[in-house]
Image: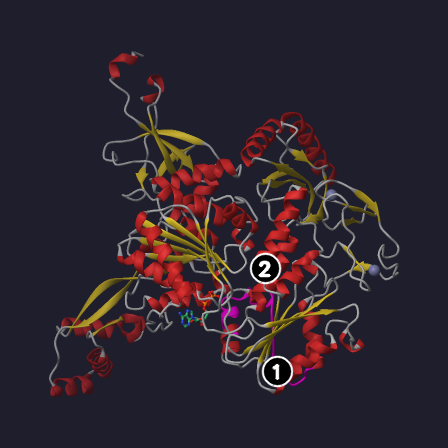
Amino acid sequence: MDLFDQGPVPPAARVLVDGLSDMALDYAIPQGMQGVVRGCRVEVPLRGRVATGTVIALVEPDAEWGHRLRPLTRLLAEAPVVSPVLMDLAEWAARYYATPVEQMIRCIVPEPVRGERHEAKTQKLITLLRRPEDDELNKLNARAPRQASIVRYLLAEPEGAAPLPQLGGSAALAACRSLEKQGVVSISEQVVHRDPAAGEQYSLSSPLELNEEQAAALARIISACDAGETQPLLLQGVTGSGKTEVYLQAAAHVMARGKGVLILVPEISLTPQTMARFKSRFADQPGAVAILHSAMSDGERFDEWHAIHRGQARIAIGPRSALFAPVQQLGLIIVDEEHDSSYKQENSPRYHGRDLAVLRARMEGATVVLGSATPSLESLLNVRLGKYSLLRMDHRADGQRLPLTRVLDMRTEPKDKRYLGILSERLRMAIETRLRRQEQTILLLNRRGFARALQCPDCGFVVSCAHCSLPLTYHLTENRLICHICGYRSVVPQTCPDCHSRSILLEGYGTQKVEAVLRRCFPEARIQRVDADVTARKNALREILERFRARQTDILLGTQMISKGLDFPGVTLVGVLNADLGLCIPDPRAAERTFQLLTQVAGRAGRGDVDGEVIIQTYTPQSAAIQYARRHDTDGFAENELGLREQFGFPPYTHLSVLTARSPQEDLAAFALQTLHRHLRAALPPSVELSEPLPAPIAKAYGQYRYQCTIKSPQARLVADTVSREIARLNPGEDIIISLDIDAYSFM
Ligand code: ADP
Ligand code: ZN
Ligand code: ZN
């Protein structure tokens, strides 16, 4: 074949095919598809079938092969679906988190949008063309009553028009067609926007007059937005300081300048109020605020996504995954409750939504605001290092005082045996008082703690590692306590090392058991339990919270779910049943999470006119997390905790990652991880600390044995690159899954 006769080789499209991990294939760009650019979604021929994919680059194909490339079959949408910035973000995140780019693109182009298979939905719109005379209508009524009633219905509509479903659906179609023939109505097709908030009424709210602290924070945010400053702003404002009002006014400002806003919230079903406040504030601009979350139907997600992509919706609100929303001309990103661990995705790709939001803002030239009453230590350290600037709001907007917090030492508190040690006498009496005064109570059960640590019920002592000061994890097979960070082993003590009590045991109780105790204790009270079982049904949580707001519930009992962003004026008592459990897990952020949880939940009390009270039951009243939370002392806690993290070399001073091997066969999982561990030890510099491979604290899940080791490193990149390379070299069999969790938030 004469290669030189065929002229120059035209550019080809390098396509990342959906579902093929990171296999990129080159395709010729046929006539009529010259508009193809990076970020376009396309259909391509692949092994006798048609596949979909994303164009990741235009390339100059090799002269010999260029003319033999197969052409793209179809362009799925005229404009690129993925913007250049989001393509860059996907590539950056893929490398940082050692995950295929294709997986990141999957986050950016959500399932309903991928194949463009969900068509826009249409319905028939019936419009009145003329107003019939009275006697004509009477005659019609005698001859065809159904037609007459349709005409009367349309007469009453402001626009003289109604969609067919409102007129009786397909049963009314014949009557409408007949009216159309008589020239009374017209029938047209109308695109229906499937609105997840349809049926909700949002009445317009006007901006509140800001207090001094709020005004200063807003001014700073606005000037950053106007100047296109990309240094992240950390808004540290106590619970109830009016952060949401600041977000609303900042968003309005940015929108008025023709730019878009992205708002991330921890989990939308847990923070319905934030969404409602945005919908209300912009109620005069219908369609301006789009919601994205996983509980929506595919159709709703498709429509909301396209409304954002077209630039119709200027504000997008959603949880973690919404950080990839295609907001046009992004001017501002707000990450509400930035400390919340739900921003970290716990399955592949294991990215951190807050961290990627900061990166996206920088790439887009947008301003990012991270808001919290209890900022993460990561963000606080960034303030200290001068990477973020700090805005503070130290007072409640409504002038209320922060609630009085009492810490009850459960080792010495009087308890009634009938209540299984779950309720102290003092908490029981406090609840009873609220019931009598018709005030509301929130009871929080801290269940994050997976009870594998040993805690003494008499003195509260938790058996910890001498080198890491983290609780040791009990391993049944070896009958040893083992540290998951450094591998330290200890025999299981028969008596408490501190007080020599013989009753040292594994702690733990569930929400259902506590609910039963509460019902026995307060037979008259209206009690509602909130946990994953109850809220599995769509809208269940919303209904529960609405009933609670309407004061149809006296006591709300739940896990950390109920500690987020809720604002109920009727709540005057918050009880934390077991503050310790969160401290008993082998996790360097255990104290931080406990502090945040207690501080956040305490912020729920006393939002109305009556002062609030918070009661914390604990076996470890002296622990720093509990003491600082009692005093609402975020700065003190941060100071203390950062000192410890630095001393033990934990995040945010290092990157702590978890490497896990899973297999239905235990020896395969163990062998794969041990082998990989040996290779990594040789490949990584001594500054990277690898822990010994061990069964994970949750040693078996979903039928798979789990082995893991932790990797502590000054840099994440080095770990990601080296581990990816070594996994590829090891080429483990089909029965073994190896995963790397960079900057891990879970060590179970
Ligand atoms: P945060 O998000 O910081 O916890 P919120 O935004 O929920 O606080 O505000 C707490 C309460 O204070 C809300 O009921 C809000 O309407 C009210 N609020 C906020 N700003 C003001 C203000 N400037 N004047 C009066 N009330 C305010
Ligand atoms: Zn003890
Ligand atoms: Zn240790």
In the image, taking residue 576 as reference, residue 174 lies left or right, namely left
Tell me which residue sits at (60%, 31%) in the image: 727
Q: Is residue 229 left or right of residue 273?
A: left
Q: Residues within 10 Å of mark 2 (few under 14, many from 20)?
A: many
For residue 683, above or below residue 354: above
Residue at which label 1 appears: 434
Q: Residue at x 35, y 62 (%)?
A: 249
User: What residue did someone put label 2 on?
Assistant: 596
Q: Assign a secondary structure to mark 1.
A: helix
Q: Residues within 10 Å of mark 1 (few under 14, many from 20)?
A: some
- Residue 14 appears in the picture as rendered: yes
Q: Quadrant of residue 689?
A: top right
Foreground: 747 or 407? Answer: 407
Q: Position of residue 108 (x, y in %)?
A: 41, 46
How far separated are the C-alphas under marks 1 and 2? 25 Å
Which quarter shows the N terminus? top left
Q: Position of residue 745 (x, y in %)?
A: 60, 48
**Where does the magenta region start and end?**
522-544
Q: Is residue 619 magenta?
A: no
Give the vertical position of 147 relative to 725 (above or below).
below
Q: 581 or 412: nearer the eye? A: 412
Camera-side residue of 112 and 176: 112
Q: Secondary structure at mark 2?
A: helix
Q: Position of residue 366 (x, y in %)?
A: 36, 47
Residue 733 as seen in the image, left or right of residue 9: right
Give x and y (percent) for residue 3. Answer: 30, 13
Q: Which mark is residue 164?
A: none
Name the residue: 51% across, 69% down. 566
Measured along the vertical axis of the image, is residue 606 above or below residue 229?
below
Q: Residue 207 occupies which quadrant of the picture?
A: bottom left
Which amino acid is tagged 2?
Answer: Gln
